[in-house]
Image (spheres, rainbow, N blue to C red):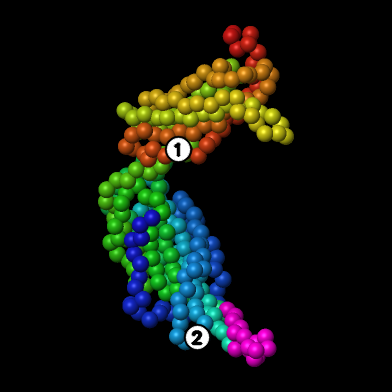
Amino acid sequence: MKTLLALSALLLAAPALAETPAVNFDQGIDASAILAGAKAAAKKDATVVSAMYPGGRRTLPDCVSVSFGANDPAASPTFELRSTEYVEECYQTGDPRHGGGRQCYERPGRTYHERASVTIRDRQPLLPWERDTFRVCLDGPWLSISEIETAYDYRLISGGNYNGAYVVAPGKKVAQRPDPVGVLGELDSAMAFTLKDRWASYYAGERIEIKWTLKKDVPNWFDPVIGEGSFSADAAPSYAADLSKAGKLESGKSYYVEYSIRRLGKVSKDTWTKTLETPKVSRASLDLALR
């Protein structure tokens, strides 16, 4: 993750303060599909020592993830962030020779509020499954923006300090992970394993690798592996493999396939997708399978 901006403490002293402490929370903005989701990330190790107190301070940052899909507008709604500061205060109690010592406790301090938004200038097209996702955080009085996963190498045009109206612009294209559900498989009673490729046209001239594991469904017990393997092919609307000889199969028993794919080329990263599985199907008898 590349941080686009990290504000300096040498700037202004602090924004407007709220005396009542606020609880750190997960914040989501629901406006069409502009924001894919939001969540707060608490960094409890962000401790800043203060000369004003015998102890120290820490802040709980508030973060929002802003995600743009291929057909979403290039500007997000404005959202609010707030970060609470906690102060540790310590004092001496009793005689250290008789069990006394330094006692510390933490109390809420200042709460910082800022408004923010993200706009993409000179936006470039995304593939249908791609998203540009950024995280905007307020940590104490400091705002920052970073990339979570994007289809381009973005640079910051404006925004920062206490101005959360971030504007970014795309640079070179960056390959993203392939669509995790772009290729879906099925298993039939004859143990023919077939897969449909939703995005084959975007991968013309490239290759795909498919990894599979055939399992027997055993209720209330571990499902044993009957066979496993992999194969590769040119990108196409569909792929198929005959698993009838993958291992010892029993008529009338249920089987399914766990599978994962990776793209071999330049359109997407060559990382394996999350493992999916086909619906369970009952193995047909040999006579029926040959009909």
Looking at this view, name the residue that lies furthest to the front: 97
Q: Which residue is mark 1?
A: 272
Q: Residue at x 27, y 48 (%)?
A: 172
Closer to us: 146 or 163 = 146
Q: Amino acid at mark 2?
A: Tyr
Under circle 2, the secondary element is: loop
Q: Residue at x 40, y 50 (%)?
A: 149
Sort mark 1 into few (<14), some (14-19) or many (20+) by Cα contacts within 10 Å: some
Residue wearing tag 2 = 53
> Considering the image in quadrants, where does the N terminus appear?
bottom left
What element does badge 1 sit on?
Answer: loop
Label drawn at residue 142: none
- Which of the 4 quarters of the picture holds residue 247? top right
Looking at the rendering, which quadrant does residue 159 occupy?
bottom left
The magenta segment is 92-106
Number of dots carrying numbers: 2
